[in-house]
């Protein structure tokens, strides 16, 4: 089972250097980080309940 960590903040840096609008990249980095705070503990709890951890 693979759990994905949040995407790296370097994406926002590259977007700012290569394009005029980096706000979307910053929003996606923030969203990814917030979602991982919820999903990673849930997936770890599920794995432990099923005997995988």
Image: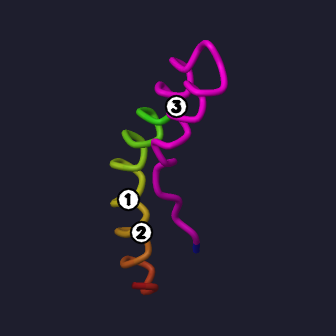
Question: Residue at point 41% right, 49% down?
Answer: 36
The answer to whether the residues at label 3 and label 1 have Cβ atoms under 8 Å apart is no
Report which residue position mark 3 lands on.
28
Query: Where 6 sits versus 19, above or below?
Result: below
Query: Where 38 sits versus 45, above or below?
Result: above
In front: mark 2 or mark 3?
Answer: 3
**Residue 41 locus on image (x, y percent):** 33, 60
Question: Residue at point 59% right, 14% down?
Answer: 21
Separation of marks 2 and 3 at Cα, in angstroms: 26 Å
| Mark before the other along the chain sequence, 3 or 1 | 3
**Residue 17 locus on image (x, y percent):** 58, 27
Q: 10 Å neighbourhood of mark 3: few (<14), some, or many (≥20)?
A: some
Q: Is residue 3 left or right of residue 18?
A: left
The answer to whether the residues at label 1 and label 2 have Cβ atoms under 8 Å apart is yes
Question: Residue at point 44% right, 75% down?
Answer: 47
Q: Secondary structure at mark 2?
A: helix
Give me the disc on residue 42. Answer: 1
Image quarter hosting the C terminus: bottom left
Report which residue position mark 2 lands on.
46
Write the start and end of the magenta stretch as one range.
2-27
| Mark before the other along the chain sequence, 2 or 3 | 3
């Amino acid at each position: 089972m693979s759990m994905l960590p949040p995407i790296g903040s370097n994406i926002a840096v590259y977007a700012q250097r290569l394009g005029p609008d980096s706000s979307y990249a910053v929003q996606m980095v923030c969203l990814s980080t917030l979602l991982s705070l919820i999903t990673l503990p849930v997936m770890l709890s599920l794995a432990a309940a099923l005997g995988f951890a």
